[in-house]
Image (cartoon, rainbow, N blue to C red):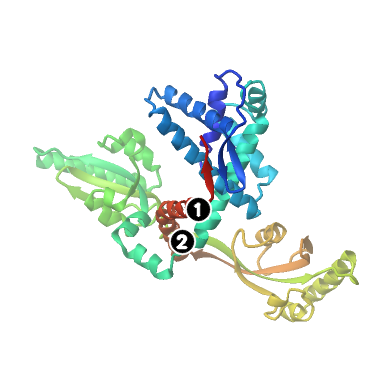
Amino acid sequence: MRFLPVLLLLASSLVHAAFTPLEQVAVVVDDSVILQSDVAKRLRDVEFQFAKRKAALPAEDILRKQIIEQLIMENLQANLAERAGIRIEDAALTATLTGIAKDSGLTLAKFQEQLDSTPDSSYSEVREQVKREMMITRLRQRRMQDRIRITDQDIQNFLKSPAGQAETASEYRLGHILIEIAETATAKDIADAEVRLNKAREELKAGKDFALVAATWSNAETALKGGDLGWRKANQLPTLFADAVTTMQPNDVADTIRTPGGFHLIKLLEKRGVDQVRVPQRQVRHILIKPTEILSSDDARLKLEDIRSKIIAGSNFADEARIHSDDPGSARQGGELGWVGAGEMVPEFEKMMSSAQLNTVSEIFQSSYGWHILEVTGEREHDVSAQVRSNFARQALYARQYDEELANWLRELRAEAFVDIRN
């Protein structure tokens, strides 16, 4: 949810004089109320924004009705979030307020100072409004996760559809060199062009920077940009280029392409997309000793030191893990955790795993689970393209359904609520 009411509050409060709240009840919403002063405040905020855009306002009775309905829906969701036990951590709230202040060109301290020095607002009021909106956002996320169901078949259908294929298509960043040939070129002109082409290709083979070669030899308008065509999907490239790049790897230079306009050299500078995602992984095993009521942390460390010494002296790591490790899942497998990537383990474990030498028992280290030793027994680049494509499709399908399902839920929430709008 964007923090529109907060920004409205900030903007209008800087230009409006102080006012005396009218504490009459405007609306009863279930077991809470909306005051006339709340309606008046929102009305001034909206009027200020329309004036900034130099836009005409609807009739006052229509505008008031819209504002009341907006406040009713905010109240219903905020009350439901409270009952659902949704809480906003101070750190998250402060981070959001810092972002709002930054959008206004202010530090958080200056933002607070400006609000507190304005008669019609206060920092605490804005803080509570942001907190309320964050609670509503989290409530909506929970409700939509419960209501939106996406099956594996939905994902496969999407990935096979033209829309899915277009959204998940790879993007290519190409370098391009054009050795131009005029329509009226003579045999000598063509031969001269071939000489220039061969010189450019030889320089590329010698390892010279593509951008320099393009600036030196290319007749294309991108020559002084190093021949860089920018990021494009295959369907946005000339057909002859697209046919070549789909089989290329980054840093490959394609065979010369001849067109009526001349000779073309293309280099695949970079490629990105959900069909080309590989992550580094390390195969690791470990032994964990946990402190207990009868085994102190120091004693747990000493026990692990003894185990480590035995392994270094020749004892089998897997046998020691089966006998001693307090991680029951991996102990049965000789301490094996399988292939592990970044972000899958607690920070202390990941740090040691990343720095450990292959086939070498690590030093003893501590995490929130206890004392560990580990051994990295292999490393690889793992293709996770299929998983990333599936996740991308799930997110796209979720986003497509979100607005419609949210509107349905809000209508149901409004219909089930007790609302008494008073004159």
Q: Residue 141 versus residue 190: which sits nearer the camera?
A: 141
Residue 267 lies left or right of residue 61; in this view the side is left
Residue 139 appearing in the image = yes
N-term-proximal mark, 1 vs 2: 2
Image position, residue 366 (x, y; %): 78, 61
Q: Residue 159 versus residue 217: which sits nearer the camera?
A: 159
Residue 360 appearing in the image = no
Q: Is residue 258 above or below residue 293?
A: above
Q: CA distance from mark 1 to mark 2?
A: 17 Å
Q: Is residue 307 above or below residue 148?
A: below
Q: Are marks 1 and 2 in contact (CB under 8 Å)?
A: no
In percent of the image, x 23 and y 43: which residue is there? 195
Image position, residue 166 (x, y; %): 32, 55
Q: Give the residue type at disc 2.
A: Ile
Nearer the viewer's eye, disc 1 or disc 2?
1
Q: Is residue 160 above or below residue 166?
A: below
Quadrant of the rendered image containing residue 129: top right
Q: Give the residue type at disc 1.
A: Leu
Q: Residue 281 versus residue 332: which sits nearer the camera?
A: 332
SS label for mark 1: helix
Mark number, residue 413: 1
Residue 97 lies left or right of residue 62; in this view the side is right
Local packing at callout 1 (Cα closer than 10 Å; few below 14, some 14-19, many 20+) is: some
In percent of the image, x 91 and y 72: which residue is there? 294
Residue 184 lies left or right of residue 195; in this view the side is left
Q: What residue would you read off at disc 2?
A: 148
Image position, residue 17 (x, y; %): 58, 18
In percent of the image, x 29 and y 42: which residue is there? 177
